[in-house]
Image: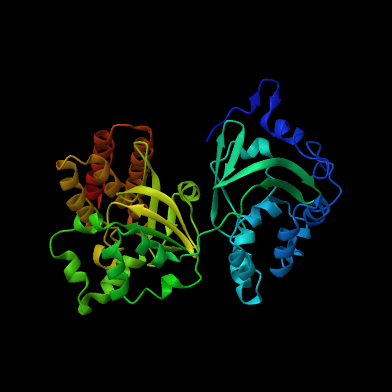
Amino acid sequence: MQTTLMRGKLSFGVLLCWMVTPALAIGCATGSGQKDIVDTAVGAGSFKTLATALTKADLVGALKQKGPFTVFAPTDEAFAKLPKRTLDSLLRPENKAQLTAILTYHVVPGRVPASQAVKLSNAKTLNGQQLDLMLSGKTLNVDKARVVKTDINCTNGVIHVIDSVMLPSDKDIIATANGAGMFKTLLAAISTAELTGALQSDGPFTVFAPTDEAFAKLPAGTVDSLLRPENRDKLVSILKYHVASGRAFAADALKTEEIKTLQGGTVRVRIVNGKPRANDAMIVKTDIDASNGVVHVIDTVLMPSNKTRMGAANPRRVIEVAIGHGAPLFNDGNPAACTAVYEVAATSLLAMDRHIPTRTRSRLMGALRDVSRAHDPSEQAWILRDALDAAYAEM
């Protein structure tokens, strides 16, 4: 989200800073705060419940460290909006983990002043999940909370005051998928492969989740075949190819371009014609938070390349398989998907150092560069097809 920072002659951050009460305006807009985050909050007098919660969760010491941290701090009135039974429950020793998850969801690593926050659409928290940020007029909203005061500077970070307690997702990946209602086939496959327990563990994981419609696009009988006991190993391999260790939000995935999966292979993530893709699948929804990871929804089932079958030592076979899959996609009017298949093949060939002639490597690398500069999907597909045909002839 890009936002103009100036409103007349005063920035958004300074305007809100002027609204801060004397008890909270410690070093406001000057960066001269002499107390750490915890002592600042305690001294303000309006964060008694927050201070109690931090003590119960044993987080006081953490927030007195060097940091820096950015804290979206709920006032006592914000906590009072929660049902009393809920708040009392959170403060019980047996619910310490849940309380910790909620409190760390209010903390972002680093110092993020208002002038920077208004330019963000999201921010990763110490909890691991993301906050959504949106500027509405002169009001910065964080998830469903409203920022009422900003830029309370402290020696180890900055505090922004919010009017509601923010609650992170408390559902694991399996529960999140089940609640969405569009992953019935995926959940059935996970159950058959006996991977349900794994995806309910702490993780965290990144899951590229094919919808029911994505599975329906597979050739007739494919899903039924995969669900048979004798094909369990193949099913496990396919499912693990959709899962990576750690939380890779969309922005991070696009920066790294490749994500290594639990299956061992990699999924290539990039923008094609303005839309995010994972290999040849369209990513139709990104960054769905779960308590133990993040889910990206895709419209096509990803199929790992079996190096034994496709031939890590047989590059000609890689090209044959790629053209066998890509050409029908092109002929069916989907050149972008065809390009994605050819790109995977070209990248795989470049990884086969001992089996690819120098001239062939240069040709493939040049084709990948040309594709990144081209904008027409058909042109991109033909650039790679010509390079693959030439590589095939040279081997």
Of residue 291 and residue 369, the one placed in the foreground of this image is 291
Please say whether residue 107 is visible from this viewpoint: no
Q: How many marks?
A: 0
Residue at the image point whose x is 71% and y is 69% from the top: 56
Residue at the image point whose x is 31% and y is 72% from the top: 236
- Colouring convention used in this rendered image of the protein: rainbow
Q: Quadrant of residue 116?
A: top right
> From this viewpoint, which residue is outermost toward the right?
34
Of residue 245 and residue 93, the one placed in the foreground of this image is 93
Q: Is residue 326 left or right of residue 148?
A: left
> From this viewpoint, which residue is outermost toward the front?
84
> From this viewpoint, which residue is outermost toward the top?
8
Q: Is residue 81 left or right of residue 152?
A: left
Residue 9 place in picture, x, y as percent: 70, 21
Q: Is residue 258 left or right of residue 144?
A: left
> From this viewpoint, which residue is outermost toward the left?
220
| Residue 140 to residue 95: above or below | above
Residue 171 place in picture, x, y as percent: 46, 65
Of residue 218 and residue 19, the one placed in the foreground of this image is 19
| Residue 3 to residue 86: above or below | above
Q: Quadrant of residue 241?
A: bottom left
Residue at the image point whose x is 74% and y is 64% from the top: 52
Residue 88 place in picture, x, y as percent: 64, 68
Residue at the image point whose x is 82% and y is 56% from the top: 39
Please say whether residue 221 is visible from this viewpoint: yes
Residue 250 place in picture, x, y as percent: 46, 49
